[in-house]
Image (cartoon, rainbow, N blue to C red):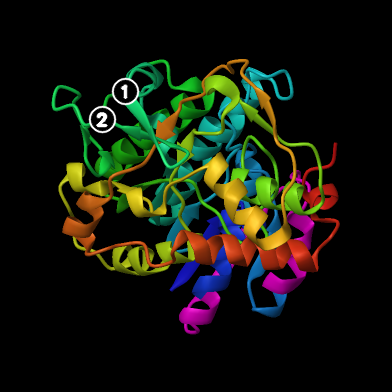
Amino acid sequence: MRILISGVCGFAGSALARALAQARAGDELCGFDNFSRPGSETNRPDLKKLGVRLFHADLRSASDLEALPACDWVIDAAANPSVLAGADGKMSSRQTVEHNLVGTVNLLEYCKSHRSGFILLSTSRVYSIEPLAALSLETKAGAFSPVFDRNVPGFGPEGVSETFPTRPPVSLYGATKLASECLALEYGEAFALPVFVNRCGVLAGAGQFGRADQGIFSFWLNSWLRRRPLKYIGFGGLGHQVRDCLHPGDLLPLLVKQFSAPKLPSEDRIVNLSGGAGSARSLRQVSAWCEARWGGREVRPDPAERRFDIPWMVLDSSKAARVWSWRAQTPTDAILAEIAAHAEAHPDWLDVSAPL
């Protein structure tokens, strides 16, 4: 089997390429990247050593994709994954749409031409901001905790399920990913292609690019270790906001099953994937973890609210457990330890992956 990974030198793409190369020696792995992201070049040597064929291509350019070899499966791991993308002045709205939606269309046309299966790595940010922000919350052990409300559709004790509303606003980033999901499923039906949509929680692990808007766990640990300024932004400036945590290597067993899956009903082709409530941590709890490893330091409060911020997000992956018998395997403490070891071994990581 030949597998093509878009964004192969990004964090998620490179992690999946490594996991596939180590677990499936009989497969031929290919990947492409435009290497626009600081830090992406650092993944090139290791992937080449593992036998991954690397191509320089920009998924926004249809002609670039036409030059790639035919493959049996495409894993779309390329995106600008910031919820602020297109709205914070650092990237235009048009660029955000071109990266995250036009790029998906180009990949789907590639799949159509080569009769390839398509797996989209989507995001928890396709879910509506307003009902998420309106959830009733209490504070426990330095973290927000939702009060379960049976009147909120798609929300239960395990978190946010696939039936939670996806109406706007979801951010430009969330909207481009939601539109990509819809188009992927339509291409699958129109051209008889196997298509799966995996909505991932917060991916984290060693080598993640350390930016506050995209790799919060890596950013926080690297910044703490290097004693760079840190702030608890919004929600009273207390650091109680919560996210789940998922190691990208935990996706591998699911991807392998999807490669050989029979045709499934369309509703079973979209699943949430996360470490669930057991993986969730607030910034204040991550700070306590850092303090236990490296000693204390000041984190300044900044109560100013930011656009698109939500106080709590944990995905319910029970559907993935039912349909695929899938569960995350790597505990959050192990993920944090992995990031910490990488930070200790790479003192310049923030300068490499997120230069000011």
Q: Which residue is mark 2?
A: 147
Measured in 3D between alpha carbons, the distance from the residue under mark 2 to the one under mark 1, in whole angstroms, is 8 Å
CB contact under 8 Å: marks 2 and 1: yes
The answer to which of 159 and 299 lies nearer the viewer is 299
Tell me which amino acid carries mark 2. Val
**Residue 69 visible (yes or no):** no
Residue 99 image-quadrant placement: top right
Q: Which percent across, then down, holds residue 3?
A: 49, 66
The verdict on residue 24 being magenta is yes
From the viewer's perspective, tell me whether residue 245 is left or right of residue 68.
Answer: left
Give the numbered dot on residue 135.
1
The answer to which of 295 and 121 lies nearer the viewer is 295
Identify the secondary structure beneath mark 2: loop
Q: Residue at x 35, y 54 (%)?
A: 278
- Where does the magenta region start and end? 21-47
Q: Residue at x 31, y 32 (%)?
A: 146
Tell me which amino acid carries mark 1. Leu
Q: Which percent across, then down, holds residue 229?
A: 79, 37
Q: Which percent across, then down, holds residue 310?
A: 46, 25
Identify the secondary structure beneath mark 1: loop
Residue 97 image-quadrant placement: top right
From the viewer's perspective, tell me whether residue 122 is left or right of residue 106.
Answer: left
Question: If the image is split into quadrants, where does the C terminus sit?
Answer: top right
